[in-house]
Amino acid sequence: MDALDRSTIWPYDEQGEPRAFFYSRYGSPTVAAAEAALGALDGGTALLYPSGSAATSALVLSILGPGDTIALAEGCYFGTSVTFQTLARWGVRYVEFDQTGPPPDGVQLVWVEAPSNPFLTMPDLEAAAAHPAPLVVDSTVATPVHLRPLEHGADFALHSATKYLGGHDDTLLGAVVCRDPAAAEALHTFRTRTGIVAAADPAWQLLRGLKTLELRVRRQGETAAAIAERLAAHPKVVTVRYPGLSGLLSFDVADGDAARRVETSTRLVVNATSLGGVTSVMESRHRWEGDRVPAGLLRLSVGLEDPDALWADLAQALTHA
Ligand code: PLP
């Protein structure tokens, strides 16, 4: 079993010199073990952060400066655009583009999401990697089980490990996986100096989550595919978005009132936010994103429940649409 080491300090060696670990803001054994495990999965050097949003902020602040512009995939995770809006005070701006085509010229960073949450579009990774600016792929939803962005020319893969990697809705954690070890070193230095560092407990939970990642994600994907098919054939469902990766899908019912009735009528599926856990959750995204999404859009993260029981629950909820 992986050891959980909660220390913040470790003794110097016999000559009074620091060993590999001496103060946890610089590095700690449990965090390092989780980084090694995730790095191996994604084929790069991983760094953990206290949340996915912390990973986003730390990455942008460490590689960009005032006057720089990010090309951000439109329709990707709402919170990423909110983070970038917050960073506007420091002179970093962003423009949105359709990630199914090439990013615009004249930007210093390209940011795509595979697949986007909640629109579930896939980026054109070849076009994004051909752009001269560094490329970040948020592969929270795809996970390394389905996509290793660094093999497609990405400079950085980003994860909200709060989702599939942790997998049990009890861990807030983020990660950046770097293709270039020198870039990882620079991020590490920035992380130490700014203190945006993950703690040992969530890192240990990540280690545990990674042991079942592939099993969970494959099963969630199988169930989601079956649910997507049944939703598509349902008379109350207008649109289904499911690219076939992992357990995340979204679908539309007639309007906002219908979506609210459906989300509050489930018994097995929990009406809550987030995604990627073993428990199925569903919510109307309009409450968070406003007119950026259709009022009738419901985002469903499929868990590990029995597929027929899940469908029975969704079918009874849809009678209220
Ligand atoms: N990226 C994606 C695709 C997400 O869905 C989320 C959270 O929902 C994040 C990043 C942010 O992660 P966290 O909530 O761990 O800060």
Image (cartoon, grey):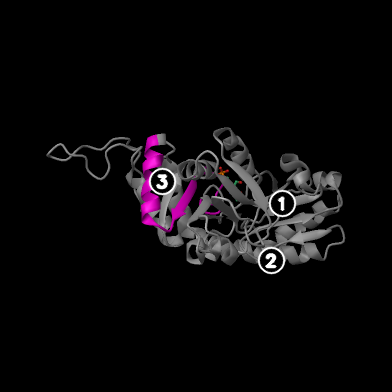
Decide which of 225, 179 is in the foreground and name it: 179
- Name the secondary structure under disc 1: strand
Q: Position of residue 236 (x, y in %)?
A: 86, 57
- Name the secondary structure under disc 2: helix
The residue at the point 65 percent across, 55 percent down is 116
Magenta range: 164-193
Q: Position of residue 313 (x, y in %)?
A: 76, 55
Q: Position of residue 114 (x, y in %)?
A: 60, 59
Which label number is shown at residue 187?
Answer: 3
Residue type at mark 2 is: Ala
Q: Separation of disc 2 and disc 1 at Cα?
A: 14 Å
The residue at the point 48 percent across, 55 percent down is 156
| Dot 3 crowding, Cα within 10 Å, few <14, some 14–19, many 20+ | many
- Name the quadrant containing residue 249: bottom right
- Name the secondary structure under disc 3: helix
Residue type at mark 3 is: Leu
Q: Which residue is mark 1?
A: 299
> Does residue 21 appear to the left or right of 106 in the view shown?
left
* Front of the two marks 3 and 1: 3
> Does residue 212 appear to the left or right of 225 in the view shown?
left
> Does residue 138 appear to the left or right of 34 in the view shown?
right
Q: Earlier in the sequence, mark 2 or mark 3?
A: 3
Q: Which residue is mark 2?
A: 225
Decide which of 24, 107 is in the foreground and name it: 107
Look at the image and tell me whether residue 283 can be seen: yes
Q: Separation of disc 3 and disc 1 at Cα?
A: 33 Å
